[in-house]
Image (tube, rainbow, N blue to C red):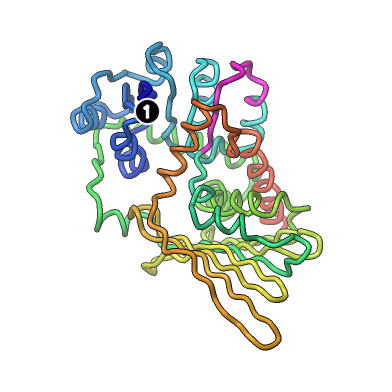
């Protein structure tokens, strides 16, 4: 067995505790070698919980650690671009949770930062690694046969599910100044795209795009390619977002609604003249919930539905394997920074419709 990949984690909040830490700890191909967070109590908790010997006072110190092969950036979104720049320059392999940055203007300069030819910079779009999604890609008919695509995220947010299923350590020793600065920076970044006079609900809608919606829109591009443009988009109250993407002879309708009804209705549907492909996603905050792909096919006289699944493998685990495969074997990385930039450009185009409306 080859030596495990030694990774350092920057940011130990909810997504790290629910997904990345347990998956890395369970996988002998990885070793959690170093951690850091702005909360000393959280660093202490994770170090004890996962037996991490090396803790760092800040991200700069961790990135200077020559014993690490890779770093995971799992911080709040407003820190991503700055940390990504430093991580690339460190020469280490990088896994960064989506979005890679909050704006295209932040991400574009990072594409030209000098880097080792074999360095992997991998953006975490875990839905694109779901077995059901990969099966849909394999089964998808020719694009010129598609008549309509519907993509949706009709959900309740994570706290409802997490409170009933997992214990997340929530520190109370983060400086109020750090929290306030983070909120102010986030607002500044959002306004750099949406305009200084943009209403608060439109700013929130753009933030929904960079968070929840980025999974679905990234998956749409993976499945169908880049659309010709955004034909229509609107938002209501910041947490209802509708967008219609132009693919020439068909349109892809995206709808997101965040409310307090306790369900997670997310998925992709593709319609041709004789087939209906339907993929579902459940909340990622309860691990190993099943996904499935349904394919209904009809002729003039018969109809039937093939069901692939249920599939219980965690997409985060498959994604982790894909990252390692790129690092170890040089397998092409489909969730690169260049790929992620396409999402940010689409979000800005959608945002222009919000302002126009």
Observer-nearest of 180 and 80: 80
The residue at the point 73 percent across, 69 percent down is 147
The residue at the point 56 percent across, 27 percent down is 330
Residue highlighted by disc 1: 9
Relative side of 73 to 137, left or right:
left
Residue 243, given in percent of the width and then of the height, sits at 66, 60
Q: Secondary structure at mark 1?
A: strand
* Quadrant in which the C terminus is drawn: bottom right
How packed is label 1: few (under 14 Cα within 10 Å), some, or many (20 or more)? many
Highlighted magenta segment, given as a residue range: 110-123
The residue at the point 43 percent across, 19 percent down is 69
Relative side of 131 to 163, left or right:
right
Observer-nearest of 354 and 346: 346
Q: Is residue 353 located in the magenta-colored stretch of the structure?
A: no
Q: Residue furthest right?
A: 248
In the image, residue 321 sits, relative to residue 38, either above or below, namely below
The residue at the point 24 percent across, 37 percent down is 172
Observer-nearest of 87 and 221: 221
- Would you identify the image quadrant in which residue 30 lies? top left
- Would you identify the image quadrant in which residue 8 lies? top left
How many discs appear? 1
In the image, residue 331 sits, relative to residue 349, either above or below, namely above
Residue 149, given in percent of the width and then of the height, sits at 66, 65
Residue 125, given in percent of the width and then of the height, sits at 52, 44
Q: Residue furthest left?
A: 48
In the image, residue 256 sits, relative to residue 300, either above or below, namely above
Relative side of 135 to 55, left or right:
right
* Quadrant in which the N terminus is drawn: top left
């Amino acid at each position: 067995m080859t030596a495990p990949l030694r990774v350092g984690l920057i940011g130990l909040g909810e997504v790290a505790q629910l997904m990345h830490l347990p998956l890395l700890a369970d996988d002998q191909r990885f070793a959690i070698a170093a951690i850091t967070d702005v909360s000393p109590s959280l660093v202490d908790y994770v170090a004890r919980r996962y037996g991490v010997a090396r803790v760092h006072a800040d991200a700069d110190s961790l990135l200077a650690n020559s014993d690490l092969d890779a770093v995971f950036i799992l911080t709040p979104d407003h820190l991503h671009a700055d940390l990504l720049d430093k991580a690339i320059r460190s020469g280490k392999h990088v896994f960064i949770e989506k979005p890679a940055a909050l704006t295209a203007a932040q991400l574009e300069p990072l594409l030209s930062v000098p880097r080792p030819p074999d360095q992997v910079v991998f953006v975490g779009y875990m839905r694109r690694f779901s077995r059901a999604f990969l099966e849909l890609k394999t089964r998808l008919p020719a694009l010129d046969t598609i008549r309509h695509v519907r993509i949706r995220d009709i959900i309740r947010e994570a706290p409802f599910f997490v409170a009933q299923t997992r214990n997340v350590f929530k520190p109370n020793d983060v400086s109020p100044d750090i929290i306030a600065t983070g909120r102010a920076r986030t607002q500044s970044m959002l306004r750099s795209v949406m305009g200084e006079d943009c209403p608060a609900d439109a700013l929130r809608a753009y933030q929904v795009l960079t968070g929840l919606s980025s999974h679905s829109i990234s998956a749409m591009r993976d499945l169908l390619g880049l659309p010709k443009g955004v034909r229509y988009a609107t938002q209501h109250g910041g947490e209802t977002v509708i967008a219609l993407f132009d693919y020439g002879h068909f349109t892809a309708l995206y709808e997101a609604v965040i409310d307090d009804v306790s369900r997670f209705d997310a998925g992709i549907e593709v319609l041709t003249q004789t087939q209906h492909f339907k993929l579902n996603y459940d909340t990622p905050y309860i691990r190993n919930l099943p996904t499935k792909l349904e394919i209904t096919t009809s002729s003039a006289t018969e109809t039937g539905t093939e069901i692939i699944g249920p599939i219980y493998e965690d997409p985060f685990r498959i994604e982790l394997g894909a990252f390692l495969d790129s690092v170890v074997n040089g397998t092409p990385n489909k969730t690169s920074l260049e790929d992620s930039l396409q999402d940010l450009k689409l979000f800005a185009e959608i945002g222009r419709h919000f302002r126009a409306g």
